[in-house]
Amino acid sequence: MLTISMIKMNAQPNKTANTGLSAQQQSLVKISALTATGNLQLLKVELNKGLDSGLAINEIKEALVQLYAYCGFPRSLNAINVFMTVAKEREEKGINDKVGRTIVVENDPENKYEQGRKVLEELTKTPQSKPAPGFGAFAPWIDAFQF
C-alpha cells in the first residue's frame, strides 16, 4: 500500500496579511514598481486607485519625478505622461482630486535648468523651450533633474 502525504506551503506571505502600510503607501509602492518596470497599462489603473485612496496629485508627481534616479529618465517621463492623462481624464469626469502641498526645489533649479538647456541646445543644435512642453508644464521641477 502506498501512502502519500501532502503539506501545502506558501513561499509568499498571505495576501490578507497586514503589511502595516496605509492604502496610500501601498499604492505608492505599486505606482513605483509599475513605473520601474514600464508597465504603463497597469500604471494607469494604479494611478486611479491611488487618487481614489486619497493620494494627492503632487505626492504622486513627486514620486514619479524622484523615480528617475532609480528607473531612468525615460521611464519616469513615461509615467508622468500617463499621470497627466489620468489627471486630465479625471478632471473631465468632474472628479476633484486633492492637489496637495506645492513641491519646492531649494537648490536653485532655475540656474541648473538654464545651464542644462544651453548644453542641450549646443549638443543637439536645436532650440530648447522653457519649460519643456507636456511633462515640463505638468511637473516643471523634473527639468531641473534632466541635465
Image (spheres, rainbow, N blue to C red):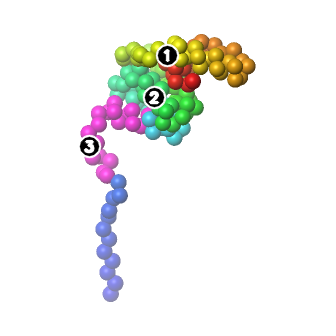
The secondary element bearing badge 3 is classed as loop
Q: Indicate left or right for 91 with 19 as reference.
A: right
The secondary element bearing badge 2 is classed as helix
Please state the horizontal and vertical placement of residue 141, each as a whole percent of the image.
49, 18
Q: Is residue 139 magenta?
A: no
Residue at the (38%, 33%) spot, across then down: 27
Region in magenta? 13-31
Disc 1 marks which amino acid? Answer: Pro
Q: Earlier in the sequence, mark 3 or mark 2?
A: 3
Residue receiving disc 1:
109
Q: Quadrant of the N terminus?
A: bottom left
Q: Earlier in the sequence, mark 1 or mark 3?
A: 3
Quarter location, residue 47? top left
Q: Which mark is residue 21?
A: none
Disc 2 marks which amino acid? Answer: Gln
Residue receiving disc 2:
66
**Cα distance, mark 3 to mark 2?**
27 Å
